[in-house]
Image (cartoon, coloured by chain):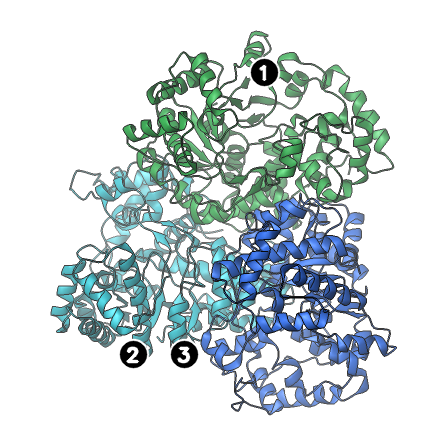
Chain colours: A cyan, B blue, C green
Amino acid sequence: MKGLIDPDLLFPGEESTRALARGLYAEVSGLPIVSPHGHTDPRWYALNEAFPDPAQLLIVPDHYVFRMLFSQGISLEMLGVPTLDGSPVATDGRAIWRLFCENYYLFRGTPTRLWFDYTLSELFGIDELPSAANADRLYDHVAECLARPEYRPRALYERFNIEVISTTDSALDDLDWHARIRDSGWKGRVVPAYRPDAVVDPDFQGFGTNLDKFGEITGADTGTWTGYLDAHRSRRAYFKTFGATSTDHGHATADTANLPQNEAAALFDRVRLGKANADERRLFRAQMLTEMAKMSLDDGLVMQIHPGSLRNHSPAILAKFGRDKGFDIPTRTDYVTALKPLLDVVGLERNLTIILFTLDETSYARELAPLAGVYPALKLGPAWWFHDSADGMRRFREMTTETAGFYNTVGFNDDTRAFPSIPARHDIARRVDCAFLAGLVAEHRLRENEAYELARDLAYGLAKKAYRL
Amino acid sequence: MKGLIDPDLLFPGEESTRALARGLYAEVSGLPIVSPHGHTDPRWYALNEAFPDPAQLLIVPDHYVFRMLFSQGISLEMLGVPTLDGSPVATDGRAIWRLFCENYYLFRGTPTRLWFDYTLSELFGIDELPSAANADRLYDHVAECLARPEYRPRALYERFNIEVISTTDSALDDLDWHARIRDSGWKGRVVPAYRPDAVVDPDFQGFGTNLDKFGEITGADTGTWTGYLDAHRSRRAYFKTFGATSTDHGHATADTANLPQNEAAALFDRVRLGKANADERRLFRAQMLTEMAKMSLDDGLVMQIHPGSLRNHSPAILAKFGRDKGFDIPTRTDYVTALKPLLDVVGLERNLTIILFTLDETSYARELAPLAGVYPALKLGPAWWFHDSADGMRRFREMTTETAGFYNTVGFNDDTRAFPSIPARHDIARRVDCAFLAGLVAEHRLRENEAYELARDLAYGLAKKAYRL
Amino acid sequence: MKGLIDPDLLFPGEESTRALARGLYAEVSGLPIVSPHGHTDPRWYALNEAFPDPAQLLIVPDHYVFRMLFSQGISLEMLGVPTLDGSPVATDGRAIWRLFCENYYLFRGTPTRLWFDYTLSELFGIDELPSAANADRLYDHVAECLARPEYRPRALYERFNIEVISTTDSALDDLDWHARIRDSGWKGRVVPAYRPDAVVDPDFQGFGTNLDKFGEITGADTGTWTGYLDAHRSRRAYFKTFGATSTDHGHATADTANLPQNEAAALFDRVRLGKANADERRLFRAQMLTEMAKMSLDDGLVMQIHPGSLRNHSPAILAKFGRDKGFDIPTRTDYVTALKPLLDVVGLERNLTIILFTLDETSYARELAPLAGVYPALKLGPAWWFHDSADGMRRFREMTTETAGFYNTVGFNDDTRAFPSIPARHDIARRVDCAFLAGLVAEHRLRENEAYELARDLAYGLAKKAYRL
């Protein structure tokens, strides 16, 4: 083995099945990356500046990394995670990096370990596992690489063989960075996705002010239900001018509603005035999923629903460090009854695509595959978040394929803000899918030529098609 | 490989384990089929007429087939699924068949694919996968077969080596087709199963009228609770004269109740008069499961409980095409508290057999195996419906065996109305079980001679014993 | 194969992976047993008397054994399980043993089978599977062994290579047997664990009297909230003098609460006077988990939470035979919201260890691993009860490792009162873990030297560290 990644990574040990997996992987490993859902910063592609030091790029912003270290007693301050009140945290990238390397053993068996191994090896040419002994040396090496032009965002985009990548952007975002990318003459394709949580969720911080701003930037009257819906329509159209093909919705549950429009308008009024109680606010969010689906039917934007995370489980961490600090915990999520109001309206539409994600694996075989296996409007998003891992992706295939087939799924989402890890994530997904297909062929459930066709679809074709990219 | 089915279908790739699986399968592949639960039409065996054209036999009535095609945008009308109001649908079997063949790739990785491959190959001698190119040729070939006497129902029953098959029949059915089969002199054993939903579920269409008819055909006074129970007793006895050994109950939940008889009688009065509210109707269904269990203790009929499907999820499809159109979706199902009232009454009875099914795989290891592993009256039915698939059946064994053992399970149910697929379904179940047993032997958790004994029991013995056939 | 246990038991069939598993297992199979949670009787180690006849030692007290036999129609009376009212049951050990041997086939595929095979083979030198034919011979052989000095409790403790074993003891226990062990001069290390259910759960039999006794033995005023808390503090300190390092809490749910102390005091008053309703009693239990956690933070006792069993499902069995007769059934268990009040108080503490167990495997990947993967105070206990089985332990690793890693788990608990089976249980856990690690190495997700380190940690190091032993 050269480097940290064995050519047979994630392939089955049994020889003939492994040979099948190798063959399939050889077919797809070089395909371009289609990244239809993620959280990279469009600023990077617009400015094309060098990335900061190794720790600020690879450790400090990665919640997978710091949550594991935190669980073992290392404070977020020592890891350089910024505090809301500006109270001091570690800023010495080298010290943070060393702390990480010393504790690299904690990640054994996790996807973070694989992503990191892959990134160190394939991007930085490192062939040693991080440790206390080599921490400084690795730091210097990575830092030296990052200073070079070929490690700038656009160069990496090209090196990673990315064909198109979607960012995720607030409905209130002016998309200025996207405009700069577009106007720069660079050939990279970076598209936004419409994420309206800030103007759809009454519990979102600054909701009232957000609606005011939403009115200003769209010229619609967000003081009325119809004006508010117009604002969405207008903003979605604006996003489309930058190449957006999708919307994204991160609700606590998958609840949907289908109120008569006069009731929806009355509900909006209470919400708008800040008079809605918890049940009404919940109902409003539910109603808005259905409204968004109806708009998608009109304007062709693919709708993504990402429900089921209980955000900011620790109030102490939220108060001190803010959101997205590793304390979002999955919860039991119902789809069958929750989605019914929305599906009653648009579920049978063939020209609509709604992609469902879950953090509750029990819903794969019981609810999601049976739903996506019959409703033309529904497709299954890939294994998400904690389940975007080798075993998690394997379970996704094992528990959805028999009922939903492959063609009601949409390929891989890297869903990451960790730009350097994108090739690692796609590579691992491709390996897992190839291993899964190889297993089907080995058990004579599929013919080899079918597996080759499927391997290409799962790695590339389905994502392009489902996301209309 | 000759035909579409490899001799090693579903066996593990690893050589020594595969050899074990082959050996076990050789032992059981020729055993007669015991089919204790299913939905074939007794009319077929009674009249023994030729089956209709390939599409009407194999595509149009199969909800697994048309739900997948529908999910990918093909209308039910184009697939020939009849509308309730008689509005036109495709009737050209050849065109429907072609549509199916063109889209055969959608079934990759699904049990439908395996059942279809098996049926085409083993029943019709076809060795090509269906495709646009060969659709017409395959259609002609299958049509030609179906016209021949050896493809008539009784000939197939014999060719399939069926020892006994149960149909599922409404409590209101006169069992006339069963009478004709019995009186025909044919040796095939086709028995009914008592399915009283139409006279037990107050929400069943025509419930009041059904009870009137129930009274007429039994001579009992179904205007009173005791008369109503007598009607059940009478009808169960009638079914037994046709060889019935079981009852079947398809409730939305596994809820049971154990009311004092005077309260049950009062509840019945309200239900009978159509005055019961939703909670009362639910309670009535719950009470009736317990009543049915008590009758089973008296008359020896094996009781089957099939809960947890949310029927007719799409109101638009229900309105246009009616029930059973692929829109029944599994839901989370509780057993531990739901079954307690019933189990408090009859759970410790050794001479009673209640077979539990689930659509919620999370209940296997958590609830069903622990319950069946201690209550003498309980047994576990096999993986059901969406889970009657290679991976589904594997998960069933993996998640029930360690707590419930093999002998608290009851072998395989094909549960199908797709008569030609019956050998495929039993064959696949046998293969999965042999592969599972081979794995236990390979890991030295079981001795080979024990695996042979178990293989026969799982394929044949347990079903006969549990269903008293 | 000599004996009943193949050297490759539970190792994968594929040759190169099996070789890896063998190597790892060779490294750990001889390590001492650390048994940080279990239910052996301290009286055994104190008196060091010969164990009674084979049936009384191996069959009659083992709920795994008698529940399976009962499920197949064998009465508990015939198995010698004592009745509460003293009505007669079988007392002839030989007859009970014979009944068991005749039905040994029922245990195929279960952990009981493996534990029994291992015990017969490794402890008693038997190389035949029990059967009707050899039942008497085996009985005589085992009985003869048990009469020998090398089969007495202390000799077995040493032969089993136990380094330390924890019992589980009521808060009201005087720990007299532990005192005798300590004073005996024997080198064995047997420590108690503080289990306060009898004085924490208002529904516990004799709760009021228990609190009176709790006051007497601690000298605290258990008529007041503060006195009651003092009694706990005092008793925990007392347990620590006997080497206790942990507490254990077996609640029906994982609910916790964090009331202001004045409200908690008022709640205690109602509970103390027997005036609390069901909701208040539930709230009191929830509050007490948080109080216990706070005390653990002060005194360093590791806290174990074992929720989710619906105890005594059959009232008839409870009335006739009492508790712990195989009728405890797992239920759906929520952790994410249930534990939040407790975690809000102590979840971020690095010097506190709370070990979570579950009977609901759906919580592994969805809730427990994400929680333990971020909260410093949380660790995951091993697969518990029905899930302490080869496939259960495998699923535990597959569903927790990617999110929580290995180092947020705590090694193995045998959790048993079946003393002779302790080596079997640890051996099987070690084998399963070695097979799991071998799989990771075979898939190149882990390096071999890391797997060796992990194998030792999982078999030995993590339990010592987490339980502070």
Q: Are marks 2 and 3 on the same chain?
A: yes
| Badge 1 density bin: few <14, some 14–19, many ≥20, Cα 10 Å | some
Q: Nearer the viewer, mark 2 or mark 3?
A: 3
- In what quadrant of the picture does the N terminus of chain B appear? bottom right
Q: Quadrant of residue C133?
A: top right
The subunit carrying tag 1 is C
The residue sitting at 70% across, 36% down in the picture is C66
The residue sitting at 32% across, 67% down in the picture is A289
Tell me the residue that label 3 is attached to: A349
Q: Do residues under tags 2 and 1 come within 8 Å of each other at their CB atoms? A: no
Q: Between disc 2 and disc 3, whose residue precedes? A: 2
| Badge 3 density bin: few <14, some 14–19, many ≥20, Cα 10 Å | some
Numbered disc 3: secondary structure: loop
The residue sitting at 76% across, 20% down in the picture is C146
For the residues marked 3 and 1, what is the alpha-carbon distance in whole angstroms?
A: 71 Å
Tell me the residue that label 2 is attached to: A299
Question: Is residue B14 or residue B467 the one in the foreground?
Answer: B467
Tell me the residue that label 1 is attached to: C188
Q: Amino acid at mark 2?
A: Asp
The subunit carrying tag 2 is A
Q: Do residues under tags 2 and 3 come within 8 Å of each other at their CB atoms? A: no
Residue B5 in view, yes or no: no
